[in-house]
Image (spheres, rainbow, N blue to C red):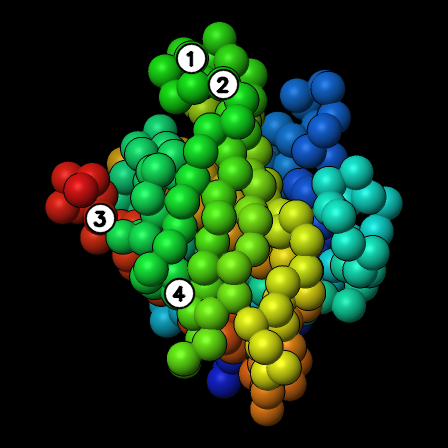
Amino acid sequence: MLCACGGPVVAPEALQDLSSYFYARWPDEDPAALEAGVTNLFTFTGQVDLDAKPDDRSFVVDPFTRDVVEELVEHDRDPADTVGVGILFASAFPPVDHLAHLTLPDGTPVEPSSPDRYDRVILEGDLDCFVAETCPILRTEAQVERKYLSITVLYTLRKELRWALTEDGERALLARSWNVDSASGGENFWILQGYSIDLFLPYEDGALRYQVSWQETEIGGLDDEDMTGALSDGMQGVFDAQEEWLIEGGG
């Protein structure tokens, strides 16, 4: 079993490459590109105890290069300056069920760090046509107010969702997101850049989730090691909130 002690460990080379691969190859017109990534992720995750505590299924991963996000963002930050953490999680709900919280107009019930504002709109496609695959991609935008202690930062988050097939012909749900620009809550709290992938692979009766967050954040008194732990804890908190929301019937 791959393990971590006292926080996320540096991911094995295969997972390092695979994490950035999903982000970089997202625009590829050939679906085989992302489908190959899904197959490889299944191979890797077979080595991980999904029932372990979060530290033992989370990993520090390297960032990608600026050219990958050049057309997406409105800042000039270099992704090489981000801290990246990926975490695995076994959900009791299949991939398609997770679309319910990924498209919530008000995302606050499933976003613990944004309890006051998470306003989302669909920019392209709609839920029904995306589920039916008559829309190949679903694009959303959210105004997110992230809270840290008594400080808040408001930023714009864009997300794209698409499907990919597994080797068994089942559908995996893939999402990629980014912060449009840098944002500040004052001298002690800056979200300079942020990117993520969120993957939902069919697994037993539910979904195998793999989420990676790359962040360059300045919070007074916290260093990169602190940030890796904060990212891991934050993603697990979102997993728990989304799972509870689905258990309660989605609302």
Closer to the camera in the image, 139 or 12: 139
Q: Circle 1 — which element?
A: helix
User: Where 65 falls versus 141 (above or below)?
Assistant: below
Q: Is residue 79 visible?
A: yes
User: Which amino acid is tagged 2?
Assistant: Gly
What residue is rendered at 79% in x and 38% in y? 71
| Residue at mark 4 to residue at mark 1: CA–CA distance | 31 Å
Q: Earlier in the sequence, mark 3 or mark 2?
A: 2
User: Which amino acid is tagged 1?
Assistant: Cys
Are the residues tagged 2 and 4 within 8 Å (C-beta)? no
Outermost residue to the front: 186
Q: Is residue 15 visible?
A: no
Residue 59 figure quarter: bottom right
| Residue at mark 3 to residue at mark 2: CA–CA distance | 24 Å
User: Which amino acid is tagged 3?
Assistant: Trp
User: Which amino acid is tagged 4?
Assistant: Ser
Mark number, residue 103 = none
- 3 vs 2, front mark: 2
Identify the residue position indicated by label 4 in the image.
Answer: 113
Identify the residue position indicated by label 3 in the image.
Answer: 245
Q: Earlier in the sequence, mark 3 or mark 1?
A: 1
Decide if residue 195 is on the left or right side of residue 73: left
Are the residues tagged 3 and 1 within 8 Å (C-beta)? no
The crowd level at tag 1 (other Cα within 10 Å; few <14, some 14-19, many 20+) is few
Residue 234 figure quarter: bottom left
Identify the residue position indicated by label 2 in the image.
Answer: 125
- 3 vs 4, front mark: 4
Q: Earlier in the sequence, mark 4 or mark 1?
A: 4
Q: Circle 3 — which element?
A: helix
Q: Earlier in the sequence, mark 3 or mark 4?
A: 4
